[in-house]
Each structure stands twice: as structure tokens, then as C-alpha cells.
Image: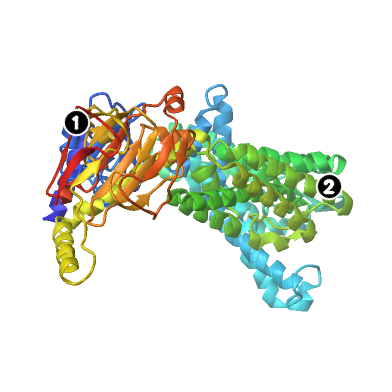
Amino acid sequence: MESTTQRSTAEQIVDGVGGADNVLSLTHCATRLRFELKDASGIDQAAVEKIPGVMGAVPQSGDRYQVVIGGGVQTTFNEIMNLPAMSGAGKSLSDADIKARERAKVRGKYAWLDAFFEYLSDSFRPLLGVLLGSSLIIAIAAILDALHIVPFQGVDRLTAAGATWVFWDAMWRSVLYFLPIMVAYNAAKKLNVDPWVGAAIMAAMFTPNYLSLTGAADTVCTQTELGKQCVAMVAGLPMQLNDYGGQVFVPLIMVAVLAQLYKLLKKIFPENLQMVFVPFFCLLIMIPITGFIIGPISIWLGNGLGAGLAWLNSTVPLLFAVLIPMIYPFLVPLGLHWPLNALMLANISTLGYDFIQGPMGTWNFACFGATAGVLVVSSRARDNEVRQTSIGALAAGLLGGISEPSLYGIHLRFKRIYPRMLIGCATGGLTIGILGWIFGTVKTGAFAFTSLLTIPVFAPTWIYVISIAAAFVVSMVLVIASDYRTPEQKAEWEAERAQNEADLAMEKKRSEGSAAAPVAAAAAVAGAGGGVATLVRTDVVSAPVAGKVIALAEVKDKVFASKALGEGVGIEPSSGRVVAPVSGVLVTVPDSGHAFGIKTDDGVEVLVHVGIDTVRLEGKGFKVAVAKDQRVEAGDVLADVDLAAVSAAGYDTTTIVVVINTMTLGSVVPRTSTQVALGDPIIDVKP
């Protein structure tokens, strides 16, 4: 029966906000459902608030809309998301959605350029898992070699370690060596070509038959600066033979050409013949074109680009070392970093090492350092949502070398982070550039995700460690020192936290039913008969400020005015002195000093909220005289408020007094339309 009620509530809420088709996204906080709607103008506010389980509704700027549920918000959220009508709607933004949104900001001017980078990105992205796995296998080998447990580096490893490390090599080279086949598969899939056709064409260059061409009778080999170069005479035509292991430009260019041929053949052959003849002619035409033309041209292109970057690195190493980490923060969110990743792989394949990943690692650790700073600040602020996101993102970064959780989960949400992270990038780049200039460029023989686990694959290791540590620490300290939130974001979060605490307190008391009154009465009887002090019953709530009392419905805050947080009154204050309206313990005293929650000995919970949206003042104009968990007596001073300063800042000074656990009490009756002094009764309370 309970499940039916919850489901009915979920359906009514979705209908109340205009139906599933009107929902762009849905998330939730501790007490509220947060909708982003296509059009919020037609919502019937009163109807939504009458839905069972709904404590209130709050329209926001634009087409955002909040529905106050209380402590059971997670259950209601799950019920809504499980509705059949919501199967294609109401999803919160994923990392891919954020990336697409960021990329869309630069779309439109050069559509072909957008398509090019998407082609590169989608050809590599599915391979991230196996690339990460292989990089960790290399890292383990490097650690064992560095500790002199098993020799791995150097030409003597075959004789020193035997077949064990030959097989270990095979474990990680399986990814890098056959990477062109995997890229060809993904690239073909991206261009709507049968991916197995693309993979089969590239695989022809890895067969024992192709590799044996270097030993054919009519093959001529010469020794060059780049190593042995062989040319085989195939059908009377010269074919330059290359080792295509790890080469990514070859499959990318080959599939781009294949896509045009594939589309042409699909038009030529009727549908009942396409299954046989389209793949047949693709293989027949594209394998020779790849071997004679595309393969050699791609190798020349990769070598040329690598040589250009090598020249920049050797000629102006400091500029190169700073440039790489400074551009990566802008390339990665848009998916434009894949060309550099392709060059890294090309360098490893042709040179045997790569010099880009060292400086690139300083960007990654600057990114992780900023996330660590966010973790510290969010932990201090008790922002559990950001704290948990930071923990996951930091673990993915430090252990896996993956920056996307940090970028899309945190950094792109808070604009203050990027400038501080860039300073960390510059610091790391300068460090690795200066030290590399003096002691030698940092290099690696593996395509490694720059994490703590892959540090040993970089040499000189000590330069790399100092550089990434500098980038990490600088970014972290800057974020901690200046916060990751703007003053507006911080004020908004503080207001939300105070509201959530009030919502949760109400929900807690709501679930306790009417048990509080019998308990209080029993305590009073026990006190009278057992020699213990008699429990004082709270019969009235006094005015915390002097001024004119108005009905709660007249207050210009929709949550309070709706009485979702309990019965009470508003007071238009004539002075800034704020005193305790009841005797009890302070359970809520935010840093901003704008609100005070007091729980009496007999369980009455009273909230005094000074002004509307005054949390945004961050305590300016508020002189707080008490602290959380402190006991106060009715009439004790809570704070002094500069009402003129609050009004000058543009905020309503109306002070709101509500009994949060109204529903657990016999009656809560406000006294309105009267002028009151400090301590005058404003609300009558009965158990």
C-alpha cells in the first residue's frame, strides 16, 4: 500500500510540473526535488502543494522549479525516475552532456573542424580502458626494474629475465602494437562503415605474410638514420614496407577514404547483394591503397609532426614545457586533445620514446591539485555533495590519471577554479622545463596515463616528481586560500543548507507523530513526584524583535508563506535587537547569523529567520552573541542587526518566526495585526 501511495505521489508531481515531456533535467538535494523545465509558466502552484507528500513548492529563476519533499526526497526521486513516462526525460547532465554543451559553444563557424575533432575523439575514447590497463602493466614493470627486483629496461632483459619478461612485454604490447586495428574499428563505426571491414583492412598490415615481405627475393633494404627501410616490388610496383605497430594516423586516414568508397558501393549494389560484394570490393581496393599509398604517407606525416615538436622541444624547451600544460585544460573539455595523444603514440612507435607526456603530466596533477583543494574546502563547509564528488574524482585522477571526473564533475561548474588551476599548470610547466633544460628532457617509452602509479615510467623520474608535485600543491593551495565558489554561489549554498536543515527538522518531527506531548507530560509528572526539577511547558512564543506582526501569508518568501515549514508570523522590525523567543538549546546558528533554531525542553522547535535572503550578506551587518548548542533563556540577546545596512543592500528585513514541529503539537495559533515589543507574546502553543 505504501509503494502505491509513493508511486501515486511521483506521478502527481510529474503531472503537476507539466508532464515528463516538460522535464529537461531532475536532480535533488537533501530535501528538495530540483526540476529544470522547458516551460514553467503554466504550473499550478497551489495544485502542486496539495499533492500528498509535498511540503511546498518554490519557483526559481528561469524555468527552474523546486518541490520540497523533506527527508524522503531520495525515495520520491527514485519513484519519479522509475516512471515509464520518464524513461527518456528527466536525466541529470552526464559528463558527455557537459562535454557536448561546452563543445557546442564553439560550434557553427567551422562545422568541418568540429566533425574532424569528433572523429578523432570517438576513434580513441572507447579504448581508454585498455590503454589505461596497459599503462599500469608497464608501470609495474618499471617499479620492479627501479627496485632492481627484476631487470626490465635495457637490451639485456632477454638474457637477464628470460621468457617471463618477454611474456610480460606481450601483455602490454598487445594494446599498443595492435592499436591501429582497434582505432580502425572505432573510426569505421563512427563513419557508419562496417567496423569489421575497417579492422580487416588494417589487420592485413599485421599478418605474417606482410611482415615476411622484408625477406622476399625482390625486396631491397637500406640503412638510414631512421633505421632499416625496405621496399618490396609487388606486381611490379614499389611498396614501402613499414612497421605499423602503434601507428594511429594510418587507420584514421585509411578509414576516412574507406567511408567514401563504402558509400559509393552501397549505392551501386542492390541491398540483397551488399552483404557480400561491398566488403569484397572494400578489401580488394583498400588493402592495396593502404599498403602502397596511405600507409607510407601517414608514416611520413607522423614523423614530420613528431620531428616538428621535437625541434620545438630541443630549440625552445622552456616554451614547449609551459605551452603543453597550458593548452590542455582547454583542449580536454572540448575533446580536442586527441591529436596530441596521437602524436605521443607516433613518437613511441618511431622514436621509441615520447617527450610530450612529461609536461602534459603537470597539467593533470594541477587538475588533481585543484580537486584536492575543493575537497578540503567542501569538507570544511560540510557540503557533502561536492565533497563526495571530489573524493571520487581525486581517486580517479591520482590512481587512474583520468581528469574527466574532475573537469566535468567540479571544475566546469565553478568558474573560480580554472584561473587557479592554470597557475598550477604554469608552475609545473616552468619547473619541468627549467630542470629538463639543465638535466635532460623528461621522456617515457610508454603511453601512460599520468597518475601516481605510472610515475616510474618517466625519466629522469626525480624531475617529473618535483614538477607534478609543484603543479599539484600550487593549485590546491590557491583553491583552499580563495575558495572554489564565488560569493554568490557561497551565499546560495549557505541559504540552501539552512533551509535544508529546517526542512529535515520538520520532517523528523512530522514522522514522530504526536508522541512528543505524552513524553513531555510524563517527564513533568516524574519531575514533580521524584524530587527532580519540574519540566517547564512552553505555552507561548515571544517576539524576538520589536515591530509590527503580520500574517505568515504576507511574508515575501514563498516557502515560509506557504507554511511548509510550520505555522508562525512575520515581524516588520523597528529595531535590530534580536532576542530568544523561548528558553531552550540553540540547534541552528549559521555563520551568517541570519537564523536561529531553538529547541525547548518540552520539544517545541522554533526558528527565527532574520530577513529574507539575508544569508547572501555573509554576516555583514549581523553581530551574533550566541553559538550553536548554547542554552538560552527567553529574552537573552541572540544578535544585533544593522537594519539600515540590510535595507541598503536591497534585502527585506522582515523577521520570520515559525514553530517547525507544528504538526506534532495540539495547536499553534499566531497573534497578528499588532505592534509588539521585545518579549510580547506572538504565538500560542498547546501540546
Colouring scheme applied when the structure was drawn? rainbow
Lower position in the chain sequence, tag 1 or tag 2: 2
- Depth check, mark 1 against mark 2: the one in front is 1
Residue that numbered label 2 is attached to: 434
The residue at the point 61 percent across, 38 percent down is 418
Q: Is residue 611 left or right of residue 531?
A: right
Q: Nearer the viewer, residue 123 or 436?
A: 436
Residue to which mark 1 is pinned = 672
Measured along the vertical axis of the image, is residue 535 above or below residue 435?
Answer: below
Q: Residue at x 23, y 27 (%)?
A: 554
Q: Residue at x 38, y 36 (%)?
A: 577
Residue 44 place in picture, x, y as percent: 19, 28
Element on which disc 1 rests: loop
442 or 616, which lies in front? 616
Q: Is residue 403 left or right of residue 640?
A: right
Name the residue type under label 2: Ile
In the rendered image, residue 322, in percent from the top left (x then y), is placed at 76, 41
Secondary element at image label 2: helix
Return the residue found at the far front. Answer: 531
Q: Is 637 situated left or right of 669 in this image? A: right
Residues packed near mark 1 inside 10 Å, few (<14), some (14 to 19) or many (20 plus): some
Would residue 565 be visible to someone looking at this image? no
Quarter holding residue 615: top left
Three-letter amino acid code at disc 1? Thr
Q: Height in image: 566 above or below 538?
A: above
